[in-house]
Image: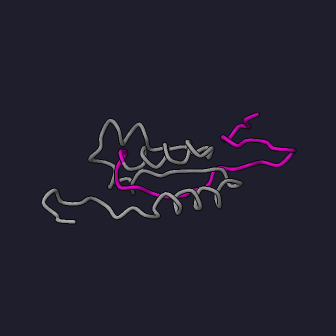
Amino acid sequence: MFGEKGTKEMNGDVDEWVLFRTYSNIHEASFYRSVLEGSGVECFLPDENIAGMRPELSLMIGGVRMLVRKSDLRRAEDVLASEGKGVTGPRRIDDDE
C-alpha cells in the first residue's frame, strides 16, 4: 500500500525512497536500473522524463537520480558491487591477447 509521499508501508513501518546514486545520463541510469530490478531491487528515476526529453539538461539538474527503498539500500550496493567483478571494460579490436 502506497502512502501520500510515495512511501510503502511494511508491517506498520514506512519504507521511504532514498537517494542511491546519481548518473550523468539517462542511458547509464536505465542500464543500472535494469540490473537492480533484475535482482529484485525496486528503484525509481525521478528525473527520467526530463533527462529523456532534454538530455542536455541532465548535468544542469545535477544528473539523473536513482532512488531505492531504504530497506533495499545495502542489497542494491551488493548487487552493483557483484556486477562489476570480472568486468575489465571495453577493449580495442586490434588488442592482442
Q: Position of residue 32 (x, y in %)?
A: 46, 49
Report whether 91 appears left or right of 77: left
Depth order, front residue of 74/6: 74
Picture residue at 39% right of the left edge, 57% below the top:
62
Left or right: where 17 falls relative to 66: right
How many labels sit on residues? 0
Side (left or right) of 95 relative to 45: left
Magenta range is 1-27
User: Quadrant of the image for the C terminus?
Assistant: bottom left
Query: Residue 42, located in which quarter of the rendered image?
Result: top right
Image position of 85 with respect to 25: above or below:
below
Q: Residue furthest right?
A: 12
Task: Check residue 9 for magenta coloring.
Answer: yes
* In the rendered image, the vertical position of residue 34 relative to residue 23, given as above or below: above
Image spot of residue 81 (x, y percent): 52, 63
Q: Quadrant of the N terminus?
A: top right
In the rendered image, residue 59, in percent from the top left (x then y), is placed at 32, 55
Q: Residue at x 35, y 55 (%)?
A: 24
Asked which quadrant contains residue 7, the reply is: top right
Query: Furthest residue to the left?
Result: 94
The picture places residue 50, in percent across and down from the top left corner, at 38, 40
Nearest the eye: 26 or 78: 78
> How has the structure been colored for display?
one colour
Magenta highlight on residue 35: no
Residue at horizontal 34%, vertical 64%?
88
